[in-house]
Image (cartoon, rainbow, N blue to C red):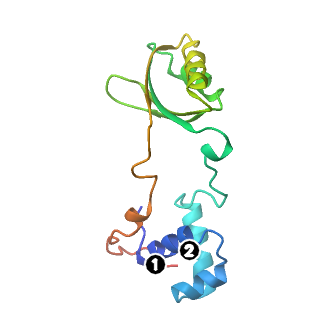
Amino acid sequence: MVIDELDSRLLVTMRAHPRIGLTELARLLGVARGTVQARVEKLTARGVIADFGPTVTPEGIGYPILAFVSLQIAQGRLAEAVRALRALPEILEVYGTSGQSDLLCRVVARSTPDLQEIIARVLASPAVQRTDTTVALSVQIPFRIEPLLRIAPEPDRGRDPA
């Protein structure tokens, strides 16, 4: 699914002003409030807009250490490994991967000894055979979506504009 130019402008503006109301958004975009509301509802229904909640930073709540942990999983035990990982609140995300590792986890910790304990808890699962940990030293490019939103949209192919 692609977005059109108005969707792009709408999303960029919403990200720049997360607390903006629909009326002000419509004014900034130069379109009717009803158009903005319909677009926001459609983008939400399609899963383009995932949430409207505040973005909470792990370091802001006491987890300044960020690490990426690759896991090798015992054959046929992926679901078991994922259940074990889900039980650890410090594991923020887990992705299935190709290559030498089966899973890639984004993990936060309060300190390096805390990270070592989290990895030990991961390894306590019989489904996990091996881990490889990389600690992030700095953020060079933080998560971003705006560059994708600014890419020229594909031509409209009969989609409903509202």
Give percent across and percent down for residue 40. Answer: 59, 71
Q: Is residue 111 above or below residue 62?
A: above
Residue at 39% over, 49% down: 140
Q: Position of residue 31 (x, y in %)?
A: 54, 88
Quadrant housing the N terminus: bottom left
> In which image quadrant can residue 86 be found?
top right
Q: Secondary structure at mark 1?
A: helix
Tell me residue 50's x, y (percent): 58, 56
Using the image, determine if residue 66 lies above or below residue 2: above
Report crowding for label 2: few under 14, some 14 to 19, many 20 or more residues within 10 A (C-alpha): some
Residue extending furthest toward the top: 126
Q: Amino acid at mark 1?
A: Leu
Q: For marks 1 and 2, give the one nearer the viewer.
A: 1
- Front residue of 78/131: it is 131
Q: Nearer the viewer, residue 146 or 40?
A: 146
Q: Quadrant of residue 44?
A: bottom right
Q: Mark 2 is on which residue type? A: Arg
Q: In the rendered view, does 44 fall on the left or right side of 149?
A: right
Q: Quickly name the residue at label 1.
A: 6
1 or 2: tag closer to the N-terminus = 1
> In terms of depth relative to the viewer, which is nearer, 113 or 128?
113
Q: Residue at x 66, y 40 (%)?
A: 62
Count every numbered label the image shows and give the total. 2
Q: Secondary structure at mark 2?
A: helix
C-alpha span from label 1 to label 2? 9 Å
**Image position, residue 73 (x, y; %):** 45, 17
Q: Are marks 1 and 2 in contact (CB under 8 Å)?
A: yes
Q: Is residue 26 visible?
A: yes
How many neighbours does mark 1 have within 10 angstroms: few (below 14), some (14-19), or many (20 or more)?
some
In the rendered image, which residue does mark 2 sit on? 39
Residue 93 seen from this side? no
x 39%, y 31%: residue = 97
